[in-house]
Image (tube, rainbow, N blue to C red):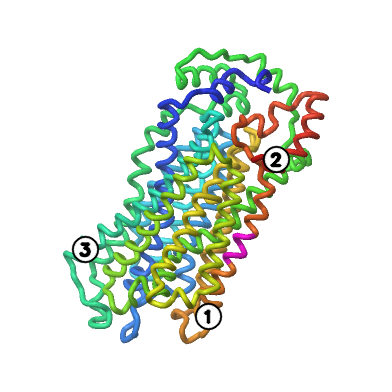
Amino acid sequence: MAGNQLQVLNALDVAKTQWYHFTAIIIAGMGFFTDAYDLFCISLVTKLLGRIYYHVDGAEKPGTLPPNVSAAVNGVAFCGTLAGQLFFGWLGDKLGRKKVYGMTLMLMVVCSIASGLSFGHTPKSVIATLCFFRFWLGFGIGGDYPLSATIMSEYANKKTRGAFIAAVFAMQGFGILAGGIFAIIISSAFKARFDAPPYEVDALGSTVPQADYVWRIILMVGALPAALTYYWRMKMPETARYTALVAKNAKQAASDMSKVLQMDIEAEPQKIEQLEREKSKFGLFSKEFAKRHGLHLLGTTTTWFLLDIAFYSQNLFQKDIFSAIGWIPSAKTMNALEEVFRIARAQTLIALCSTVPGYWFTVALIDKIGRFSIQLMGFFFMTVFMFALAIPYDHWTHKDNRIGFVIMYSLTFFFANFGPNATTFVVPAEIFPARFRSTCHGISAASGKLGAIVGAFGFLYLAQNKEKAKADAGYPAGIGVKNSLLLLGAVNALGFLFTFLVPESKGKSLEEMSGENEDNGAEREADLSSSTNHKTVPVA
């Protein structure tokens, strides 16, 4: 197959790890750092928003966001992300990866700042403005998923491609960590300057007017890392695979990669013309695509969907789980800034001990043990630990056992990140043809965000106490935390099963995985019949 391959693509496949690989990881990764910061920092400040804008005089507990408002604030960015993944994924295949890459970043910068400047004279207008800007922030974040993954996969070599794409995604861990650390710093600084009594001592005085600046600053700082990398994104050349295989400009592809790889590469325009004549022109919604890649797309979409139901329902509502087991004190025993500090500290500890290490375990091992094995193992242990939390849930709520609960909870996060949370991002960028790569990654990622919406909205209601009187204000009775965790365990078990639809791409070129080197007459027919036998079955 290498004989069929363009020299410029072969040069990329066999290139040694060089400085430009690390540059690409940092440029693409800072987008993901920002994505994670922006998506997850909202969970640090939702309790504060409730205290500021939904205070009820004489109430026993501090104000909380009503169910519909909480669902909107937590979920609206995911709705934007889903739309952005589909739109920018499609646009990345139509206009090119580079042309669209800057648009997503600028949208993120502008909307991060605008989110913090949400205005209005009433709580309703402030929250409505916040939701509006967070939707468009999510839209920009959505574009970063297919574009960053596709760019990194098309720049990388065969040997370490998985690690490079996973490293871009792993910057999410640092983004979550940075959000928690920054919230700790800001809440501590404001608490030191504007100290206040707990809510049970002075309900109104427990939330100082300056607390309104805290959530705004936390949201706005997300614009900084994105703004700092904009210039470097614009300097990156278009990927050779897009230029050669989609735009059909062999000369430009060779020229760009000659500079990047610092070697002479032959343009080979005749080979591109020959490949173009031989290549079958099937579309995304054709029978041929369904025959070749239908099961693969089903595998990448279902596994990402199921993973994100579990991952985001856990991550967004960590603070509720910590409160339920007593790791964060009762809200009425704290003032507003103390509560932000406690929630941020708990989330930072989880990120530091399990989330970040999990990502980097994947980076270290993905090209050694393969995507399939890591994903299967991750889903398996997530299922085990989720059931281990859920079945003896009453045992974990006793004060002496809380640390054990946090350790088990951390392990589910560790195996999510040293598992399907990373691999579901990597694989769709490797197994589809160049002209559909960004679109198919966008479809897979959008399916994941649909799962995140189900997790975020569903868990909000499901985890409520079974007794209406003990449920949070404004919520109907739910099925309780225990039954919610059992349900998430079942979701992870389904993810394990659907992983068998996803092919192993370790050590293979992108063209080998997508079948783009197999489009030639009788040989192509033979290859197709054999590929349908081996591509849907993972190779260890």
Give the residue pinned by disc 3.
Answer: 190
Secondary structure under tag 3 reads helix
Residue segment shown in magenta: 488-493
* Residue 362 visible somewhere in the drawing: yes
Q: Residues within 10 Å of mark 3 (few under 14, many from 20)?
A: some
At label 1, the amino acid type is Pro
Label 2's element?
loop
**Quadrant of the rendering where the N terminus is positioned:** top right
Contact check, label 2 and label 1, Cβ < 8 Å = no
Residue 487: quadrant of the picture: bottom right
Q: Which residue is mark 2?
A: 284
Q: Can the viewer see residue 90 in this picture?
A: no
Of the residues shown, which amino acid type is indicated by label 2? Leu
Q: Along the line of sight, which residue is nearer the eye, 343 or 110? A: 343
Disc 1 is placed on an element classified as loop
- Which label's residue is closer to the chain start, 2 or 1? 2
Report the magenta stretch's main SS. Answer: helix
